Amino acid sequence: MSVIVIGSGINGLVAAAELALKGQTVTVLERLDRPGGAVRTEALTLPGFRHDVAAMNLSMFAGSGFHKAHASVLATHGLEFVPVDRPFASVFPDGDYFGVSTDLEETLSTIRHPEDQAAWKAGLVAFPGKAGALGTLLSARMTKGGLSRAGWQILRSQGFTGALDLMRLLVSSPRNWVEQTFTDPRLHAALATWGLHLDFAPDISGGAIFPYLESFAGQAMGMVIGKGGADTVTRSLVQLIESRGGSVRCGAEVDRINVVGGQVQGVTLTSGETLKASNVLANVAPRALMRLLSGQSGDAGFDAGMKAFRHAPGTMMIHLALSDLPPWQAQALKKFAYVHIGPTLDDLARTYQQAMAGLLPDAPVLVVGQPTVFDPSRAPEGKHTLWVQVRCLPADIRGDAAGQIQGRAWADIKQAYADRVMAQIEQYAPGLSGLVLGRHIVSPLDLEAENPNLVGGDQVCGSHHLSQNFLFRPVRGFADGHTPVKGLHMVGAAVWPGGGTGAGSGYMVAQNVR
């Protein structure tokens, strides 16, 4: 019998592609009328403007084990990256900025204090060794054997003292790391902002890893985005699957997973059609998997853990078609892929606290993406797209921290909140509104309505706090993607190694399917 993959997000497609390359017959089932999950590119505003629906940064995919193994095959199916030499910057109220470029001297020129310049250079020197050790851990299988092998490799490469230093970094909060490494509060905020990409406010333990990796990886290697859009990954994977005899069926929503005697038998679609399979890979959020299993897997501990799985705060996406790049007060910002707006550590912490309390943040943390700086093919000649990610928003609104927006339903207030975000950007780029040719707003609940994996607009499919990461993602004892049902496997951002475009769970789980 064939293998069925539920969901055509990046992990589902990577798993299907890996299985197809191994000679298995694979069918991917997607409820929407188009594949890709959060890795899609669409004309959301005006004809000729292509917007990444959610994911924009493809560096994790480019560096993934799957891509390294199959880069040449993917290239023959159209996968193409665009290199980015200025990956990110942060802007501050005085109009100044800090920016990371692959040119070390350019980066250092935006760091005010000599001691911080020295710390940055020292961090860059140490980065290859530390990143290699972290990569060993972050790509390890969360099993006794996998962890033992990873631990031994890290101990051999780092030594006992180095391994302890790495462990300290693993449990540090973003604030711990930035304040112990640098003196300038601007640098503290600029680097800690990366933590909020994975639900780590400045003072949450375990949140230092992502800021550390993104900061120095941006300096050492830059970043990549997709040529023509992030969907270059989706299109190439679909073509690869189909070229090996597999299929990707869109508009095919799964109603239930069929289990007999603890063994998966296949799935039944909402149309009533039943498909048989000896293995099913579910690229779905925990609560969706439990719904497909009618609430029971046969293991009470697994079921309780899946039902208790906690999601991160929501995200709003604002997609803009522009007649020109934003008129940043700091003109150099027109050269960067990302511009973060979150001036201080306390701003980041306040935004997170407000969202967790159910309040619309008065000044949310913003990630402003400028993909057409590096890939002009995404817009008509001379025009641009802007990708604005509004971080840390409540799915259920209890009030407005600014006391200005009275509504409590996203459908009623998303335009007003988008106006707040635009006004916030204009503090740093006066006149931006006058350049807008088209605007498309996606609230946290809009995100979930289109992609049920993004519960409450949570774009990373579950908090990555230590209690729900590593061996505990999604549930202790099941971090390698297996489930209590024989032949049923989980893949996706809810499974170790978690969110992002690296597709680690899809690749690792597919290698275990027989």
Image: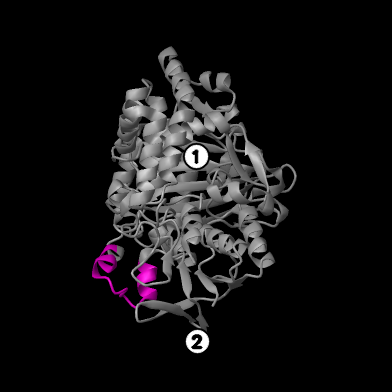
Looking at the picture, how far across and down is residue 276, in whole percent?
51, 81
Residue 326 falls left or right of residue 161: right
Residue 233 or residue 39, whichever sits in front: 233
Residue 201 falls left or right of residue 250: left
Does residue 203 show up? yes
As drawn, the residue found furthest toward the bottom would be 272
Residue 327 falls left or right of residue 185: right
Would you place residue 108 above or below residue 16 in this image?
Answer: above
Cα–Cα gap, marks 2 and 1: 49 Å
Looking at the picture, how far across and down is residue 425, in whole percent?
50, 39
Looking at the picture, how far across and down is residue 426, in whole percent?
51, 38
Three-letter amino acid code of the residue under disc 2:
Gly
Residue at 27% across / 50% down in the picture? 467
Does residue 91 show up? no
Q: Which residues are magenta?
A: 287-305
Q: Which mark is residue 272?
A: 2
Q: Earlier in the sequence, mark 2 or mark 1?
A: 2
Looking at the picture, how far across and down is residue 100, in whole percent?
53, 28
Give the structural element (helix, strand or loop) at label 1: helix
For label 1, the crowd category at 10 Å Cα-Cα, with few meaning under 14, some 14 to 19 and many 20 or more, is: many
Residue 117 or residue 155, whichever sits in front: 155
Could you tell me if the residues under marks 2 and 1 are in contact, i.e. CB atoms within 8 Å?
no
Residue at 50% across / 86% down in the picture? 272
Q: Which mark is residue 4?
A: none
Pair 2/1: label in front? 2
Check disc 1 and report the residue beneath it. Answer: 425
Please name the predominant secondary structure of the magenta segment in the image: helix
Three-letter amino acid code of the residue under disc 1:
Ile
The verdict on residue 465 being magenta is no
Would you place residue 511 above or below residue 192 in this image?
Answer: below
Residue at 31% across / 36% down in the picture? 173
